[in-house]
């Protein structure tokens, strides 16, 4: 069943590009915020470990100075506020919308989005409840602890180990909850209970699906970290050659930065849509099997 679910999920996304478009519409701001966190922590690691030869601060100061010179700093601040608001508002709707688009393929994206809006508050409640148990949240906190140099503490190591076990269990047992909330209009805690029961009854399949999510996220983090080097090195080389004031060089750097943001965010939307798709298909398959 595991291979069939993954293959079917890939076929669904390939054959129904409107799901990708719906994910791009609703999850783009979520992807941008996630990209920001990766750049932020990646930047902190570089500054902490390699400050002697890679001056990342030059890159950051360049962007801030350039925006200020073009009187665009206020515009960027407003854009950041809009992204944060859209991130908080659209992500829960997007999750439910994609589930409805999968469950009712005859519907347009607009109709799926409107139905997703009806589940905004329970999806938001589930989102905030599950954030501490996200693999991404655990990874960012782990990096923060690493930067604070407190890994040597036995108590910290013990707490991290316990949290890691809880995160793995929650990722494996709770993933059907968002599907249940959207399709069956269950209260959040009832959906979590039902999800746990379904996952525990099919532990091997749920574990394999959780493992796929973990591997894809880790691989994507590595790809993001590598790609983030491109604009940073462009700025670093431009600073070293003292050609930052050249309008052509400046234009290339800005084009590369924005292109990477768009491409990476688009890829992340596809991955998020894939996660929702295969958890949805697994839940439908398991409930049919129980019947």
Image: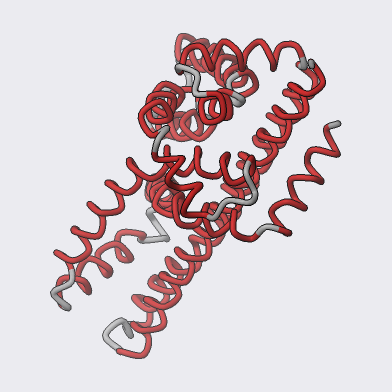
Q: Name the one closer to the observer, 172 or 40.
A: 172
Left or right: residue 113 versus residue 56 is right
Give the colour scheme shown. Answer: secondary structure
Point out the residue furthest to the front here: 106
**Does 195 sit above or below residue 49?**
above
Which quadrant, please, contains the N terminus? top right
**Does 275 sit above or below residue 56?**
above
Give residue 74's position: percent from left, percent from top.
Answer: 14, 64
Which quadrant, please, contains the C terminus? top right
Q: Quadrant of residue 124?
A: top left
Q: Name the one closer to the observer, 66 or 13.
A: 13
Residue occupying image coordinates x 50% and y 39% = 95
Left or right: residue 10 versus residue 61 is right
Q: Quadrant of residue 79?
A: bottom left
Give residue 193's position: percent from left, percent from top.
Answer: 56, 10
Give residue 43's position: percent from left, percent from top.
Answer: 40, 51
Residue occupying image coordinates x 78% and y 41% = 6
Give residue 206's position: percent from left, percent from top.
Answer: 73, 23
Q: Quadrant of residue 148?
A: top left
- Count the labels in the image: 0
Residue occupying image coordinates x 54% and y 62% = 227
Q: Name the one closer to the observer, 224 or 270.
A: 270
Left or right: residue 246 versus residue 129 is left
């Amino acid at each position: 069943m595991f291979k069939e679910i993954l293959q079917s999920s890939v076929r669904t996304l390939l054959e129904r590009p409107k799901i990708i478009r719906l994910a791009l519409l609703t999850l783009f701001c979520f992807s941008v915020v996630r990209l920001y966190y990766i750049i932020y922590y990646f930047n902190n690691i570089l500054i902490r470990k390699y400050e002697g030869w890679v001056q990342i601060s030059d890159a950051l100061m360049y962007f801030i100075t350039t925006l200020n010179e073009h009187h665009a700093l206020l515009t960027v601040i407003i854009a950041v506020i809009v992204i944060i608001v859209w991130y908080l508002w659209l992500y829960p709707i997007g999750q439910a919308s994609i589930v409805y688009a999968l469950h009712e393929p005859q519907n347009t994206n607009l109709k799926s989005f409107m139905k997703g809006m009806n589940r905004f508050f329970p999806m938001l409640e589930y989102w905030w409840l599950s954030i501490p148990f996200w693999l991404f949240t655990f990874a960012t906190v782990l990096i923060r602890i690493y930067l604070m140099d407190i890994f040597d503490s036995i108590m910290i190591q013990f707490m991290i180990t316990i949290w890691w076990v809880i995160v793995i269990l929650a990722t494996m047992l709770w993933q059907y909850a968002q599907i249940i909330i959207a399709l069956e209009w269950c209260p959040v805690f009832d959906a979590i209970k039902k999800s746990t029961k379904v996952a525990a009854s099919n532990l091997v399949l749920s574990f394999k699906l959780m493992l796929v999510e973990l591997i894809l996220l880790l691989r994507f983090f590595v790809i993001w970290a590598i790609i983030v080097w491109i604009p940073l090195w462009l700025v670093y080389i431009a600073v070293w050659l003292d050609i930052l004031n050249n309008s052509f060089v400046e234009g290339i750097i800005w084009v590369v930065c924005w292109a990477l943001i768009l491409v990476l965010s688009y890829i992340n939307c596809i991955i998020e849509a894939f996660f929702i798709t295969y958890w949805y298909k697994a839940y439908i398959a398991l409930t049919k099997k129980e019947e």
